[in-house]
Image (cartoon, rainbow, N blue to C red):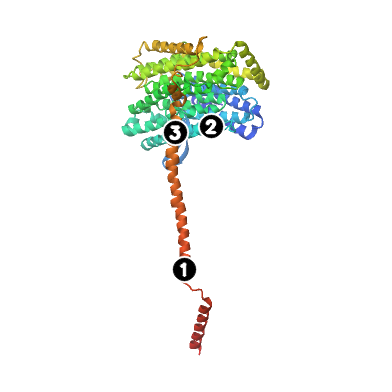
Amino acid sequence: MSPFQPEDMTLTTAVLTTVAPFVSFVLIMLLTRSRPRLSAGLSIGAVTVSLVGAVVLLCLHWHTGKPVQYTTRWMISGDTGIPVGYLLDPVSLLMLLVVAAVSFLIQVYSLGYMAGDTGFSRYFAFMSLFVWAMMCLVIAPTLFQLYVFWELVGLSSYLLIGFWYRKFSASQAGKKAFVMTRAGDVALFIGMLLVLLHLGNLNILEIDGPEMAQRMPPNLLTLSAVLIFGGIIGKSAQFPLMTWLPDAMEGPAPVSALLHSSTMVAAGVYLFERLFPFFLLSPVAMTVGLTIGTVSMLLASTMAMVSRDIKQIWAYSTISQLGFMIMGLDAGSLFSGVFHLTTHAGFKALLFLCAGVFIHRHQTNDIFELSRLGVRSLKAPMVCTVIAVGSLAGLPPLSGFFSKEVILAGLGDLANPMWLTAALLGVFLTAYYGFRLVFILLFPREPAERAGQNEGDRGSEAEHGHGGTAHWLMTWPLILLAAATVLLGFLEKPLERFLLGGSAPPGIHSSGYLALVPYIALALALAGIGLAWVEFGRRSAPRVGFVERVPALHRLFAERWYIDHFYRLALDRLIDRGIARLFQDNDDKVIDGGIDGVCRGTVFGGRLASALQSGMIQYRLLATFVVMVMLAVYFFL
């Protein structure tokens, strides 16, 4: 038996890594839906295979840096072939590992969170489908394959967001997410077609190649880049398609953790990373992206400042941080976007899983109610929440500090200081709303005895259903994610060498670092924490934020800048009173009117025909008979 060549081992490992979750999905749906434990075992076993495979692939290619591509033709039409396969390069390998690792921890956590749910097997089947779709998106060598799994990620997220479909708000949230992301997908599809018409194929390596600038006219290249960025806006919930994500919190907490950390919304930023050299060819598209990212970051931060729902606060935070990543990428720094996406996956999954523990224990999402019920007595998730919020706020030595520093450095290299100023404002707001939540949870206003009594009562009820095993199944993934949040920042330099291969590609700025920016950012983060402490933490704190002191401003932020109202107005005016009215007129005047006209014509024709005859059939028959007799006499006699 001949030994595997390195390439053969790479291909075999890549196939096992991506196919295992799909096999799990098929087996659960066809064979094991009535056996919940076996279904969970299949799903977790499959994602374990994917995790091991992702680690092996990363180790095999850690020092090579060269992209490896495997393709085969899937369909042939005339001279055009549609290939499918694998593209393994530093960007895809790192993302593959992030997806596999976070999915593994979330599925283990789900064993406790979803215990006793009637849809236990269905939940793990959808999880496997989601992971398979995201992995195949990550390793896609062509935009066509990426788009197919992009849509499949949207479908599986719809199934998971509306998992508790008997709950009306959950089914509505699933529909809203599905429809709003489709709006961006239409733009992405048109942008892909423009590239296909000029390049002749959708191979990602060719699209990212330097000859792309010669093969597409500049205006058309800019148009296609902006349209493709439209898909990123929809998938990553950026302005103006941002309000579906907070409503998607109707799904189970582990689903929220997966959606917000390494799949679904992360897919948009990943597409930007995937086509980063292509976007660099269009300064207009980069400026559009920078504007959208900045607006999204600031708007979402203001929404998080006034929300009382713990999951919605982290959802707004996700939108804000994704905007922050897009700002870094549009500033010309690939590594800053990739690095912050990686660190964000760790601490955002941690935040949602901790929130899931609180909600699972006390059955409420309201942070003031959670505080009153004594949530701070849950030591492990509370400590992990503080660590994750510290990383979100950019405090050293946590991972968020390092990745935010790289983004700020990239923005500092831009000629216009407005972008860096906006990012620093975002740092202040992030620290404020993050620690507002922490101080509310840590320092309840009710006497400790009463809070403790309530906590004990609720705790006994919760533990009656699932016992201590569920608690530990939900706790140890938190500990691992917290460890990653602490340690990941120290891997900045090795990851930079792995991703960039020791030399920055054209357009990536590695100089011009503003020495004072990290200190200014840290000072602003501490100022945000200090303000949150004064308003929500100290013993005599009024627990009223500075925004709430201005009712009009508070209402503006709480109503999400009236974006949903605008959509409702647009639907009423454009869809209901515009397009729907046109269809109604067409139905009334063209279709019904045409049928009515034909009917009236038929009736009129019948009446006209009836008027032309007298109805004296006997006389006519008699006359005919007489004529025939006379003719017979004439001819035969």
Tag 2 secondary structure: helix
Tag 3 secondary structure: helix
Q: Tag 1: residue type?
A: Ala
Residue 35 lies, with reference to residue 346, above or below; the image says below
Q: Tag 3: residue type?
A: Tyr
Q: Residue 567, labelled with which disc?
A: 3
Nearer to me, 381 or 68: 381
Figure quadrant of residue 405: top left
Q: Tag 2: residue type?
A: Ser
Residue 203 % position (x, y) = 42, 32
Residue 218 % position (x, y) = 31, 32
Residue 518 lies, with reference to residue 227, above or below; the image says above
Figure quadrant of residue 229: top left
Tell me, yes or no, if residue 156 can be seen here. yes
Residue 140 lies, with reference to residue 399, above or below; the image says below
Tag 1 secondary structure: helix
Nearer to me, 127 or 248: 248
The reply to whether callout 2 and callout 1 are in contact (CB within 8 Å) is no
The residue that disc 2 covers is 156
Q: Is residue 3 left or right of residue 203?
A: right
10 Å crowding of disc 1: few (<14), some (14-19), many (20+): few
* Mark found first going from the N terminus, 3 or 2: 2
Nearer to me, 297 or 184: 297
Residue 268 % position (x, y) = 45, 27
CA–CA distance in space, label 1 to label 3 = 58 Å
Residue 472 % position (x, y) = 62, 17
The residue that disc 1 covers is 609
Which residue sits furthest top?
A: 539
Tell me, yes or no, if residue 488 can be seen here. no
The reply to whether callout 1 and callout 3 are in contact (CB within 8 Å) is no
